[in-house]
Image (spheres, rainbow, N blue to C red):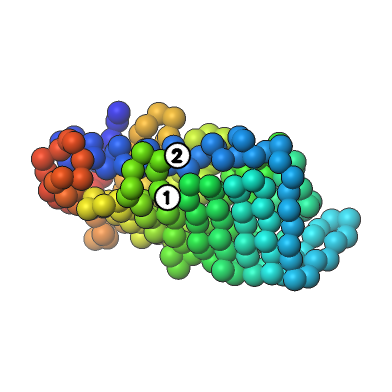
Amino acid sequence: MQLIPARPAAWPALVALLVSCLTAATAPAQVGDQGLPISWNADTMQLDAKMAVFTGLRVTQGKIGIEADSGRASKIDFEDSVWHVAGNVRIDTGDGYVLCDSADLAFSGNQLRTATVRGTPAIFELKRADSDQVTHAEAGQLDYDLSAGVVEFSDQVTITEGGNQISSNYLLYNIREQRINAQSAGDGGAKVKMTYTPGTSETSDDKESDEAQ
């Protein structure tokens, strides 16, 4: 596994944490749910040939759920549609959820393919099946390409599980290749930081590192 920045002894606990977190959050719920009926609930809905506009939106398909104060969609299905939702947005994925101010969602083949999430901050939480601990992430923006298996966190990123935490201005996760790239905010900006608490993982003896690429 390639990690950037590098001080290998300090990273294994967080690498396992983050990769397993994002792997668990990708497609398992969608794979089983894509053939299930889609349920709609909204305070108001306006439809025309080009757009559907909602207020008080609630959409569910199996374990997947989307809630928002308002939203608009190019089509009212998940076969091939683009959605923008805003205001108290909650996206449930079965094992976790995202809370944010707004999100742009692209669906095809009855699956969520990409999501751009923004918040002050946006919050992501996941409870893994193999752990009682909750993984908590905060960032100003999250760009998630489910098809490529790549997640980009940007704008004051912090990811925490148990006593372990990593923070930076930018974090790139390639889930398939199990590679993490963390970057500082540049000259004079905040550096990449990691805190590891002994006893929360089977590996690594370092307690804290403060590094930047």
Residue 25, which numbered label? none
Against 206, residue 56 (above or below) is below
> Residue 152 vs residue 66: left or right?
left
Q: Name the residue: 42% across, 54% down.
A: 125
Quadrant position of the C terminus in the picture: top left
Dot 1, crowdedness within 10 Å: few (<14), some or many (≥20)?
A: many
Between 6 and 89, the one nearer to me in the picture: 89
Snapshot quadrant of residue 88: bottom right
Position in image of residue 191 (x %, y %): 24, 55
Q: Residue sitting at 70 percent across and 50 percent down?
A: 82
Where is mark 1, residue-wise? 126
Q: Disc 2 marks which residue? A: 24
Picture residue at 17% right of the left edge, 35% below the top: 203
Q: Quadrant of residue 30?
A: top right
In-image side of 9 versus 172 (left or right): left
Q: In the image, what residue occupies the spot 15% across and 45% down?
A: 199
Q: Amino acid at mark 2?
A: Ala
> Which residue lies most toward the right here?
49
Q: Is residue 37 above or below residue 57?
A: above
Circle 2 crowding by C-alpha within 10 Å: few under 14, some 14–19, many from 20: some
Q: On the rendered structure, is 28 left or right of 9?
A: right
> How many labels were placed on the picture?
2
Disc 2 and disc 1: Cα gap in Å?
8 Å
**Would residue 209 be visible to someone looking at this image?**
no
**In contact (CB < 8 Å): disc 2 and disc 1:** yes
**Residue 106 drawn at (x, y percent):** 65, 47
User: The residue under label 1 is which amino acid type?
Assistant: Leu
State which tag comes first along the sequence, 2 or 1. Answer: 2
Q: Position of residue 42 (x, y in %)?
A: 74, 66
Compare residues 37 and 84 and report the one nearer the observer.
37
Where residue 178 appears, as percent x and y from the top left, is 37, 32
